[in-house]
Image (cartoon, coloured by chain):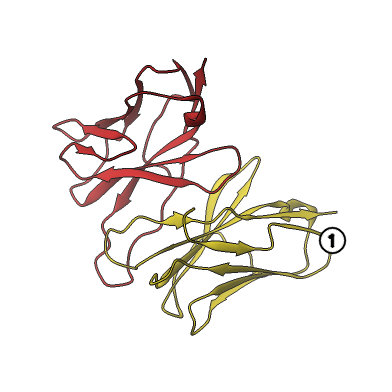
Chain colours: A red, B yellow
């Protein structure tokens, strides 16, 4: 069962920041927040993940609230190629070598970037 | 390019037939995951292997089976195919370490007619 809640769709203007929210109010201490996206039936693409600190990489920033019950994925300057379904996933930390956990996908947010 | 290679890209077959989907993980990755994506079900986890051994099983039908070979490539076998098996099948891999992200291939699109 997906443990996250995301809006089904969002729109964003090209060049503006896209802020995608995710609620994960039942997250536990050993669970990470992962973000993936899927562009039109391609394989899901890893974006970023975090535990409790904010994270940034070349693709996006991840802001996790202090109580860890929600997070926001930020695409700083959205382009048309960022149009995709974005998945927020809560994933337990594996405990043994080879025990890394599967990802459980929900329905995600369909982000449309408009010119 | 994720580094995960899936073949074939497309497969069209008839009901009752058997097919094999192949996945080559990223260089150095020991763990392989299989997912099914159909229009009405979203991305569903099927099965995971780590270094040749089955590690986790999801909603995989008894008609489906998988294995991971010594060279770490994996195959998903689908038999007695039904129309409802038409879907995208994705393979993903990672190092198998505690918290490493999964990296997905671009899938095999299976059409059962």
Q: Secondary structure at mark 1?
A: loop
Judge left or right: residue A47 versus residue B43.
Answer: left
Disc 1 chain ID: B
* Between A108 and A40, the one nearer to me in the picture: A40
Q: Quadrant of residue A76?
A: top left
Q: Residue at x 18, y 36 (%)?
A: A54
Quadrant (top left, top right, bottom left, bottom right) of the C terminus of chain B: bottom right
| Residue B48 in the image: above or below residue A28 | below
Q: Quadrant of residue B31?
A: bottom left
Q: Residue at x 50, y 36 (%)?
A: A107
| Residue A60 in the image: above or below residue A44 | above
* Between A24 and A45, the one nearer to me in the picture: A45
* Between A106 and A72, the one nearer to me in the picture: A72
Give how far across and how far down residue B98 sits, in percent.
26, 63
Residue underneath mark 1: B15
Does any portion of residue B63 appear in the rendered image? Answer: no
Give how far across and how far down residue B41 sits, in percent.
60, 44
Q: Residue at x 77, y 70 (%)?
A: B18
């Amino acid at each position: 069962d997906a443990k996250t809640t995301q809006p089904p769709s969002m729109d964003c203007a090209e060049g503006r920041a896209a802020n995608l929210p995710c609620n994960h109010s039942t997250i536990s201490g050993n669970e990470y927040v992962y973000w993936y996206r899927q562009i039109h039936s391609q394989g899901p693409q890893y974006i970023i993940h975090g535990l409790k600190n904010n994270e940034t990489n070349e693709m996006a920033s991840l802001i996790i609230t202090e109580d860890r019950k929600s997070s926001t994925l930020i695409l700083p300057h959205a382009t048309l190629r960022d149009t995709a379904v974005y998945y927020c996933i809560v994933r337990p930390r594996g405990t043994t070598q080879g025990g890394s956990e599967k990802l459980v996908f929900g329905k995600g947010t369909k982000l449309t970037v408009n010119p | 390019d994720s580094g995960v290679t899936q073949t074939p890209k497309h497969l069209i077959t008839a009901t009752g037939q058997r097919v094999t989907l192949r996945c080559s993980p990223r260089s150095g990755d020991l763990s392989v995951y299989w997912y099914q994506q159909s229009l009405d079900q979203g991305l569903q986890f099927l099965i995971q292997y780590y270094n040749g051994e089955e590690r986790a099983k999801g909603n995989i039908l008894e008609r489906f089976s998988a294995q991971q070979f010594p060279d770490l490539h994996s195959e998903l076998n689908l038999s007695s195919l039904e129309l409802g098996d038409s879907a995208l099948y994705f393979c993903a891999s990672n190092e198998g370490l505690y918290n490493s992200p999964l990296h997905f291939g671009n899938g095999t699109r299976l059409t059962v007619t």
